[in-house]
Image (cartoon, rainbow, N blue to C red):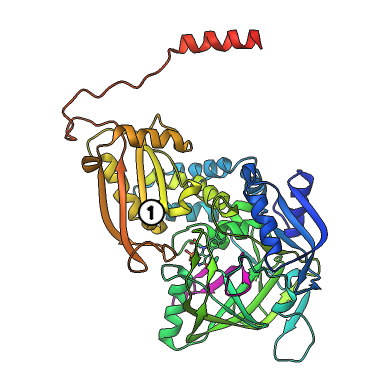
């Protein structure tokens, strides 16, 4: 069964020995971040942390802060209530195999139908515990505002406090389709924040249509609830595949949606906080700097402004946060789970694909390792170009393609293949493509070059005119004999 609250998930982490509770008061200004950074950098991602008495400028907040709750392979699986995220990938594969799709578009649409069949469709409910306490702005009732939430200042040169795990709900004004994405929010004052949806993201696309229509854009930001919502918000689903439906599929239970109090949007009824509000057409404000996923501060830039009209919350709310910075951080485990879960969808488009990973050093898209079952010349290049054309994989800065017998999760093994198997001029390609907005290396933001390496064994027709050497390997018999001997000698 799904988690009915973020608190229930935090308690499950505690029971599994995956949580450290900190009863001491700790400042939200840098100190929680410093503590979390140490934990995230410890082997395997350390433990989740629950700060029971966070301080905001010396004042104790009534809401605890939970951080690093998904920051290990085990906690990521616990977040999705699975033994392993591979189990979810297997379910997706079963749906896709029911009637093999002929192309990627059909694959996604089949996945959508499959999800519907599994009764993952959201349900509308009249009341939600996320509205247990309601604070409407501009109506005089004393309640909470953003300054009462234990929002972190993460790094010394950050432009202020940032909400780092917000699930941002928007709607396409033309089609009515929902979107759920994660875009950080800089707090400007007690009821205004930035809205950092980058140009390639669905929230930005929805925003653009509201601006063109000259209409105020309703936006609801949820914090907490079942961690499946947060995972769905970050997952690179194609535009049009409903994250709420996907969350229902993951949690094997429909997401219950409740109407917001002040805007025409619906949100999951069991989340911890809902920040209701709007983005005004053509209003922007400087956002940043922010110590980002890249390990560098992102520069100050103009982004839309989010005005709050209400905050609603459950009484037992816990404030969820993460910290990004020099890898490895919690977000690596979230991104890694996405790749593992959607591997069957990638395999559908590339039948030769065996495995794929985005190692932590590459901070998501900077580095992609792919292994393939190679059959014909230039197949590695075909896979690279295909990946560069698929959704957020367009940002992949370096793609290294290896043969199927190379373990892509072993960076050292991939680097060995890269160094040994490539003649740089023959086996590399450089293309032009959109770049990640956060990438500071390209001369112009959002556009740049990407590089692919074919580190596979060369086949006839690939301009290699020598005998390809054999990889040094021990016989299986010798391995078994030594296994047995070692067991005997302890
Ligand atoms: C912790 C975390 C923070 C993120 N912050 C941002 C952000 O500030 N802006 C952004 O455009 N994407 C951000 N992302 C990436 C998006 O959430 C991700 O690309 C998602 O798929 C976007 O959803 P969309 O395609 O529905 O827009 C963040 C991801 C994570 C894991």
- Badge 1 is on which residue? 396
Image spot of residue 8 (x, y percent): 76, 55
Q: Residue at x 70, y 48 (%)?
A: 47
Residue farthest to the front, as pictured:
156
Q: Secondary structure at mark 1?
A: loop
Image spot of residue 193 (x, y percent): 59, 79
Mark 1: few/some/many CA within 10 Å (<14, 14-19, 20+) = many
Query: Which residue is nearer to you in this view: 96 or 440?
Result: 440
Residue 128 in sight from this viewpoint: no
In the rendered structure, the answer to whether residue 90 lies left or right of residue 461 reads: right
Relative to 21, say whether 407 is above or below: above
In the rendered structure, the answer to whether residue 195 lies left or right of residue 448 reads: right
Image quarter of the C terminus: top right
Residue farthest to the right, as pictured:
23
User: How many numbered circles are shown?
Assistant: 1
Relative to 348, say whether 123 is above or below: below
Q: Residue at x 58, y 44 (%)?
A: 85
Q: Quadrant of residue 240?
A: bottom left
Asked if the stretch drawn in magenta spans residue 119, the answer is: no
Asked if the stretch drawn in magenta spans residue 171, the answer is: yes
Which residues, given as a range, are shown in magenta?
158-179
Query: Which residue is nearer to you in this view: 142 or 353?
Result: 142
Residue 240 in sight from this viewpoint: yes
Q: Residue at x 63, y 42 (%)?
A: 43
Q: Quadrant of residue 458?
A: top left
Ligand 1 under 8 Å from disc 1 Cβ: no
Image spot of residue 247 (x, y percent): 59, 57
In the rendered structure, the answer to whether residue 189 lies left or right of residue 416 reads: right
Image spot of residue 13 (x, y percent): 74, 49
């Amino acid at each position: 069964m799904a988690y009915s609250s973020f608190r229930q998930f935090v308690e499950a982490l505690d029971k599994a020995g995956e949580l450290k509770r900190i009863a001491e008061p700790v400042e939200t200004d840098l100190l929680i971040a410093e503590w979390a950074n140490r934990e995230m950098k410890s082997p395997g991602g350390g433990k989740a942390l629950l700060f029971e008495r966070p301080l905001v400028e010396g004042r104790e907040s009534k809401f605890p802060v939970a951080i690093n709750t998904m920051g290990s392979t085990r906690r990521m699986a616990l977040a999705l209530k699975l033994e392993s995220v591979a189990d979810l990938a297997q379910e997706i594969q079963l749906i896709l195999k029911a009637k093999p799709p002929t192309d990627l578009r059909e694959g996604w649409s089949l996945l959508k139908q499959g999800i519907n069949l599994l009764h993952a469709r959201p349900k509308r409910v009249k009341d939600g515990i996320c509205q247990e306490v309601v604070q409407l702005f501009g109506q005089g009732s004393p309640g909470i505002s953003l300054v009462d939430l234990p929002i972190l200042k993460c790094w010394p040169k950050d432009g202020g406090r940032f909400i780092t795990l917000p699930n941002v709900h928007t709607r396409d004004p033309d089609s009515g389709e929902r979107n759920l994405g994660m875009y950080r929010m800089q707090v400007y004052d007690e009821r205004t924040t930035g809205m950092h949806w980058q140009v390639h993201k669905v929230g930005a696309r929805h925003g653009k249509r509201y601006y063109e229509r000259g209409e105020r854009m309703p936006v609801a930001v949820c914090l907490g609830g079942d961690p499946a919502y947060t995972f769905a918000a970050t997952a690179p689903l194609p535009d049009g595949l409903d994250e709420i439906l996907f969350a229902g599929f993951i949690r094997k239970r429909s997401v219950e949606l409740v109407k917001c109090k002040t805007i025409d949007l619906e949100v999951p009824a069991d989340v911890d906080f809902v920040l209701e509000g709007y983005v005004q057409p053509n209003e922007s404000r400087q956002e940043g700097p922010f110590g980002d996923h890249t390990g560098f501060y992102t520069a100050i830039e103009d982004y839309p402004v989010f005005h709050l009209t209400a905050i609603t919350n459950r009484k037992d709310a816990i404030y969820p946060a993460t910290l990004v910075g020099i890898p490895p951080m919690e977000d690596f485990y979230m991104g890694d789970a996405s790749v593992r879960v959607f591997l069957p969808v990638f395999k559908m488009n590339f039948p030769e694909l065996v495995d794929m990973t985005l190692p932590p050093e590459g901070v998501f898209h900077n580095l992609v390792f792919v292994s393939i079952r190679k059959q014909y010349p230039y197949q590695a290049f075909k896979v690279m170009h295909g990946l560069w054309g698929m959704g957020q994989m367009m940002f992949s800065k370096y793609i290294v393609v290896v043969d199927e017998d190379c373990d892509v999760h072993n960076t050292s093994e991939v680097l060995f293949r890269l160094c040994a198997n490539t003649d740089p001029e023959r086996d590399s390609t450089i293309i032009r493509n959109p770049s990640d907005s956060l990438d500071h290396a390209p001369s112009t933001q959002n556009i740049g070059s990407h590089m692919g390496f074919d580190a596979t064994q060369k086949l006839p027709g690939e301009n290699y005119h020598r005998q390809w050497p054999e990889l040094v390997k021990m016989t299986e018999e010798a391995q078994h004999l030594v296994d047995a001997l070692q067991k005997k000698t302890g």
